[in-house]
Amino acid sequence: MNWIDLRSDTVTQPTPAMRAAMSRAEVGDDVYGEDPTVNRLQEKAAELTGKQAALFVPSGTMGNLTAILAHCQRGDEVILGDKAHTFLFEAGGVSALGGVHSRQLPNQADGTLALEDIRAAIRPDDPHQPITSLITLENTHNRCGGVPLSPAYTRAVGELAYEHGLKLHLDGARLFNAAAALEVDPKALTQPVDSVTFCLSKALCAPVGSIVCGSAEFIERAHRIRKQLGGGMRQVGVLAAAGMVALETMIDRLAEDHARAQKLAEILSECPGLVLDPDTPRTNMIFCSLREGFPLTASQVAQELKAHGVQAGVAGARRFRLVTHYWIGDEDVLKAGQAFIEVLNSVPHSVRTGRDR
């Protein structure tokens, strides 16, 4: 079956142009720094983010872990949100592998951390307490609805970090979605930060890989950390070639994914039994929930949708996350919306409303 797969943009497959580039990629030993395709990719990534240097890593999780360990010593503390991907979905790596203590602050509805909360969380110089070394942000913010964080907010956090002698890292897994939604140059979102990680996969469609960007000195430290984590690869230009195509061809089309998400949200807003989050979607993610009292769970609805060729992301007992991407076209949006309507309408009215007709 040709699925309409809305579970995530991680399901994207490389485009034909990427496959062709991979087949003819010029390669060398990247551990020796001799893979020309990787080197070109890293130079391109540094240019796009306005940083001095960049480092190719296998995944976004390794990218964030590498950055945090390059900024922090064992026993240091990192300030991050309680809905941050690094806190929720990266297996506690910063603590388990780096001995870095995390201070979780409540994410606001717009994905930000309140400046007063950050300021209050910075530790005093006290031997009884860990040393606050780093603040991390996430843009777009996944669990807060795929919302983009503004340049003004990022600058404000950067200024606060600088004032207290802290570093600022940005988990920019979907950085270019944020830039597209805000209609700004990506550098406007990365200029205030000391380091940034972004994914070549997800909406950019490359099969594997993320990039860590920062100062030359920072990347030198990150390179050593990557080696310690087992991320040193050899003739990896076959993957970097797909990343180059991603950066050259996929960034400028991300607004198309956002427009299709908006269209799908409009259809779903008419769905019985379904409530959309306020202002969703802000980028390529739609968050919605089953109405109170609706008798099926999100997992049960998702199972019924499979019969219509649709795979939906389940984000909670009664909650969905639906993500558009390169492989979701206009016709797919219409079919997916109709599938939701049919599945939710298939539940008898008296059961849906909890009363007789």
Image: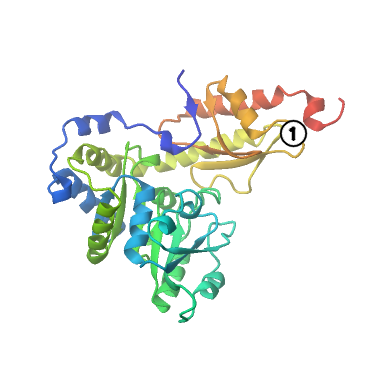
- Whole-percent x, y for residue 35 in the image: 14, 45
User: What colouring does the structure picture have?
Assistant: rainbow
| Drawn side of residue 232 relative to residue 137, left or right | left
> Residue 202 sits in which quadrant?
top left
Q: Quadrant of the C terminus?
A: top right
Q: Amino acid at mark 1?
A: Phe
Q: Nearer the viewer, residue 116 or 277?
A: 116
Q: Residue at x 22, y 29 (%)?
A: 20
**Residue that label 1 marks:** 294
| Drawn side of residue 89 relative to residue 304, left or right | left
| Drawn side of residue 206 relative to residue 128, left or right | left
Q: Residue at x 42, y 78 (%)?
A: 163
206 relative to 342, above or below: below
Task: Judge whether residue 151 can be spotted in this image.
Answer: no
Q: Nearer the viewer, residue 3 or 63?
A: 63
> Residue 114 sits in which quadrant?
bottom right
178 relative to 161, above or below: above
Q: Residue at x 48, y 54 (%)?
A: 148
- Whole-percent x, y for residue 74 in the image: 38, 66
- Whole-percent x, y for residue 349 in the image: 79, 25
9 relative to 175, above or below: above
